[in-house]
Image (cartoon, helix red, strand yellow):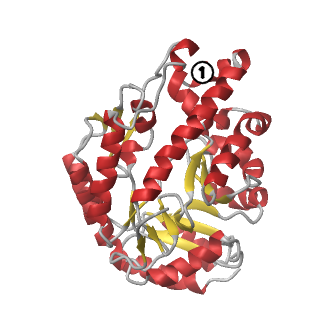
Amino acid sequence: MTHHRLEKIAYKPHAEAVLDGLRQLYERRAEDRVFASMDVPSAALAAFRRNHREGFCPYPDPAERILFWDSYLRERAAVEDDSIPSAYLSELDQGLYGGLFGGEVRFLCDLETGWISSMVPPLINDWAEFDKLRFDESHEWFERYLRQVGIFVEGAAEKFGISHFILIDSLNFVFELFGATRTYLELLDRPEMVRRAVDFAFDLNVKIQETFFDKVPLLAGGTFSNMVQWVPGRVVSESVDPFHMTSVDYFERWGREPVERIFSRFDGGVIHLHGNGRHLLTAVSTVRGLKAVHAADDRDFPPAFEVLADLKASAGDVPLVVNADFAAFQSALQERRLTGGVFYKVKAVPDLDAANRLMEKVRAYRV
């Protein structure tokens, strides 16, 4: 159980009203309404871009990272949108899971988002090595995880929250072991071993996520989320990325059960789909315990906002989160073309005044 519970956060003065709306959205009681966050210019991000270079970098000092998040989220306190401020443990978002078993954790700096994220090259060459893998709480990377979570929780200190971070379970973890191409081959050649690895990954992810919820405060009984802002309960963030390159049948055979299993271990979960995974949306929308789907934008695919009617038809009453260009969103709102039951992350808003004026219309909008 979580030992800490927040009721207010300083960087969202009117959080109570926002939480009430988000609760209705994720409980599927807001099909007639729209919700939005406003991406306004950021001095903290501008400073990050000046002080960092794109590409590979060392593991950063968590104390410096939480200062970045503090600066970035403090700036946003005057934005009267439906966002809930939270820092993301981007340094641990993938590399932690492989690092715990001796993987070489590599960090990447992203100037667009201010994230420093991580990955590892494949961990093993054959299944005989898999049998030697053991989780050890005294491992350097688990201690780094505990230390960074502690620093972030202390630095957030009732000003903002700490977002849940991505699961690396199911085939995602087999990707960590062998890489993507080899994983797809192993599904055909050694399915029984893949199932063992999936079970191993379940136990590992439960341990990591239970540790997170044991140490990170909830807000009004809900989870901070970089994907969906805030959602009631202890909710995890799932990835079905390996199935983006497969048929729906493969998702049904290999993906659904592990997702539903870990969702049932917590209070459900959220899933993101990339552009090449939209064919999975109808199936994913029927996953037990699903709270929302974040439909991401990717090169060579139409923006989710432009095909939102089709996505919503596939998702049914499952809430969607999509990105939207400021001008396109503003036009659709004025022309009453916005789809309800959707959270819109509005990008490149010119300034604070434009954001808050637009939010007045968002709050009044009804489908």
Given the image, on which type of amino acid does mark 1 rest?
Thr
Q: Can residue 304 be seen by looking at this rendering?
A: yes
Depth check: 310 or 224 in front? 224
81 left or right of 268 in image: left
Residue 108 sits above or below residue 312 on the image? above
Q: Residue at x 58, y 48 (%)?
A: 238
Where residue 32 sits in the image (x, y, percent)?
A: 71, 79
Q: Residues within 10 Å of mark 1 (few under 14, many from 20)?
A: few
Q: Residue at x 62, y 52 (%)?
A: 265
Q: Can residue 187 be seen by looking at this rendering?
A: no
Residue 219 sits above or below residue 181 on the image? below
Where residue 284 sits in the image (x, y, percent)?
A: 72, 49
Residue 49 sits above or below residue 191 on the image? below
Where residue 59 sits in the image (x, y, percent)?
A: 27, 38
- Residue picked out by circle 1: 181
Q: Secondary structure at mark 1?
A: helix
Q: Residue at x 60, y 28 (%)?
A: 197
Depth check: 201 or 40 in front? 201
Q: Residue at x 66, y 72 (%)?
A: 338
Residue 275 sits above or below residue 58 on the image? below
Depth check: 8 or 225 in front? 8
Pick the quarter of the image with the C terminus.
bottom right
105 left or right of 297 in image: left
Q: Quadrant of residue 69?
A: bottom left
Q: Give the number of marks.
A: 1
Where residue 200 sits in the image (x, y, percent)?
A: 58, 32
Q: Quadrant of residue 318?
A: bottom right
